[in-house]
Image (cartoon, rainbow, N blue to C red):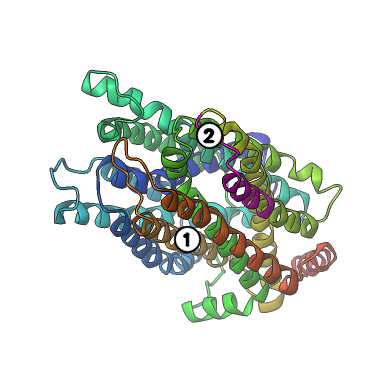
Amino acid sequence: MKLKVNQKAAFGFGAFGKDVVYMLIATYLLNYYNVVLGMNAAFIGLVMMGARVFDAFNDPIMGIVVAKTKTKFGRFRPWILAGTVLNALTIFALFAAPATDNPNSGVMKAWLAIFYVLWGVTYTLMDIPFWSMIPAVTESGPDREGLTALARTCSGIGDAIPTVLTNVVVPIFSGIVIGHQVTTGNYSEWKSGYLVWAIIIAVVFIISEALMVIQVPEPKIDEDYQAPSVGQMFKSLFANDQAMVVVISIICVYASLNICGNLLLYFFQFDVMNPDGYALFTAVAFGFQVLTMMVIPALRKLFSKNQLFLAGFIIQILGFLAILAMAKFGLYSPENWMILCVPGALVYVGYGMLNVIMTIFLSDSVDYGEVKNGSREESVIFSMQTFTVKLASGVAVALAGGIIEWIKLDTSDGAIQTAETLNGLRMWMTIPSVALLIIGMIIYKVLYKLDEAKMEEIKGQLDRKIES
């Protein structure tokens, strides 16, 4: 089916809303519970990893549930709307932690664990059907690539909003609530501002997904269609070798960025010693990411998907290595930190390219699976994207929490860090990310086979199947 311009815009707005929420949690929850509330970072990391891994293994089940759903509103939209409302409630709860003199009390730990698990489960309810709509409402080729680029561009903008603005608006909101000016260094006073900001983001989330559900139609469900059994679905999934290659690449790419991302705010707070610079740094980085994703359709006229994918890996690796080199040679300071924007832009240009192309590859693997296995499993295959993102981010946040404790980073107000601590922060923020990207690039280069010629062949086979 062909979507109208307003429908594509609504889908993009939905992508924007869901990533505003995701990035608030992924980027700031560890810092909020650790620096603002004072909870042990290693414990937070373990809870977040455990919750993500638990939830990740539920994702394929959710994909199966979506595939078996039949309602007059479609397979995808009911789950998107229900998951959005429930997820917004958990966001409020996570930032409305009870007041206590002991941030490491059993009550506080239980609060984080329960509501973080619920956040992940409810996000799954809407995330899997959301991305599953792309191969369902588009055909392989420019139509699919255009909608994917639009959605990923809007996601990038959504990622940027909380990443760039949180450190700016939270002190302002905190000052309004408690009645006096709150400075950047008074992190313990940021609690009320975080809650106000979380409520605003949750409302934007609900509005964006509601508009998408209203505006974007689904293909009519074939009443004669019989969804395969759970066993048949998993068999089809693991028999789809190309989907598995993309999944492994996604794990490497997301884990790479999440390891750096979870430590980046600490890097600006305690190494660069300019936490205010974090907002501008991320604005520049996300700006380059969004611009890159916007021009992917134009770049596709000059380069193949495979060429752009490999370029994304190489550009990101160069960015991470440049950050490490700048740290080694002392090229930045609290006043001269903007030089870091250059490697930051490289990292996010590469990520923008990889992010769009990975989604296209995953959609292409749906068509490949239909030809190879005789069944079309959009929801199950795209559940693997959510699975891998959560698994990668869960491992990354646990690693970040452990690193903060292991390198003895002192997060108290006005603390001075040792040279050994800062060197550890710099190394862990970059070297593991480079290693993961190299692994992902090698796996993709050796095993991925769905180039343009192969996809044209698959599209022809599917067209003949429809005609017959």
Cα separation, mark 1 vs mark 2, equals 58 Å
Q: Residue at coordinates 64% horizontally, 52% vertically from top-left?
A: 321
Q: Is 70 or 234 nearer to us in this picture?
A: 234
Residue at the image point whose x is 53% and y is 37% from the top: 160
Q: Main secondary structure of the magenta part?
A: helix
x then y, percent, for residue 14: 52, 41
Structural crowding at the residue carrying mark 1, measured as other residues with C-alpha within 10 Å and reported as few (<14), some (14–19) or many (≥20): some
Q: Given the image, on which type of amino acid does mark 1 rest?
A: Lys
Please give the range of residues in magenta.
Answer: 317-334
In the rendered image, residue 223 lying in the magenta stretch gets the answer no
State which tag comes first along the sequence, 1 or 2: 1
Q: Which residue is mark 1?
A: 70
Is 20 on the left-hand or right-hand side of 454?
left
Q: Is residue 324 magenta?
A: yes
How many neighbours does mark 2 have within 10 angstroms: few (below 14), some (14-19), or many (20 or more)? Answer: some
> Nearer the observer, disc 1 or disc 2?
2
Mark 2: amino acid: Ser
From where the camera sits, is residue 87 visible? no
Q: Is residue 385 above or below residue 96?
A: below
Residue 140: image quadrant is bottom right
Q: Which residue is mark 2?
A: 333
- The spot of residue 77 in percent (x, y) is 48, 50
